[in-house]
Amino acid sequence: MCPSLKSFLKFSIVAVNVSILIIGLVSLGTGIWVVVDEQSFFKTYSNIIDLSVVDKDFIKEGAIVLLSAGTATALFALIGIAAARSNSVFLLGFYVILLCMLIGIEVAAVTLGIIFKERWETKLDADVLQKIELYYDGSDTDGTFSASLNLLQQQEKCCGWRNGTDFTLNNSKWNKTMEDGSVVKVPATCCFKDDLRKIDCMMNPNKNNSYFETGCKTRIEQLFINYQGIVIGLGVCILTFEMLMVVFSICLLTHTVSSKYDMS
């Protein structure tokens, strides 16, 4: 192998892994920030990203996952950089094994996600409906599930998870009895914003005065469909880079081994 090709392989591996290291450190730092001082994080990004529509418990759990993933990503990148810089047969071989394992895990995760799509969708439906039953009380108190769902319904123009019947069929904590004794079926956030007779809408919701027939699940699925091209493209790019790193690392490993045991 000519020196210029060897230098190109080493530079490529180091450059890609430096980028991965930066991503890993940013993810690690963000995860630590949310876990240690979540109020500061929410305050800083509230004007940039609307986090109010997301349950804060979900964000905390996501932060722990982000912290763990960031740590693993940073360590993975450091191993790649050290392997390329040192020309160590052990490190290069270990790096190739890690890359192959990572590709295998990603392919397996995507395959299992497709195979068990209906199962995890059913589980998600059950979890959200249970939260509506146990935690939805109609309040707008910051950080609560009720406030998150109300804001989601307003912004995405939807009602309930499947549709407005989620509020009528589930025996939730929400007090549906008004001061005058009338009973409502859906919260005000299910009604059209410009509807001046919201009480009528809440008592007798239909497609002409509310989003009663459109569930928030449908809206979220539409968002995924709108951006699935970007997600698929990003996934293909990541997989391509990983395959290239495998090829480059094997080439460098082969050269290192052959040079080490070259008796000529």
Image (cartoon, helix red, strand yellow):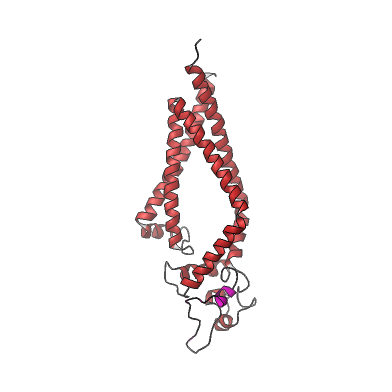
Question: Per the image, is 43 magenta?
Answer: no
* Viewport quadrant of the N terminus: top right
Q: Percent from the top left, x then y, of residue 253?
A: 51, 25
**Point 42% across, 71% down: residue:** 141
Q: Percent from the top left, x then y, of residue 30?
A: 41, 50
Position above or below: 2 against 35:
above
Frontmost residue, 114 versus 232: 114
Residue lying at the far right in this picture: please name it. Answer: 208
Q: Is residue 155 visible?
A: yes
Question: Per the image, is 165 magenta?
Answer: yes
**Point 56% across, 77% down: residue:** 168
Position above or below: 110 against 134:
above
What secondary structure characterizes most of the magenta part? Answer: loop
Q: Percent from the top left, x then y, of residue 207?
A: 64, 76
Frontmost residue, 162 versus 101: 101
**Point 56% across, 47% down: residue:** 109
**Point 62% across, 70% down: residue:** 214
Position above or below: 157 against 263:
below
Q: Is residue 47 visible?
A: no
Q: Give the magenta-colored segment's residue range.
A: 158-178
Q: Residue 24's quadrant in the figure?
A: top left
Residue lying at the far top in this picture: please name it. Answer: 264
Q: Percent from the top left, x then y, of residue 254?
A: 53, 23
Frontmost residue, 99 versus 218: 99
Residue lying at the far left in this picture: please name it. Answer: 36
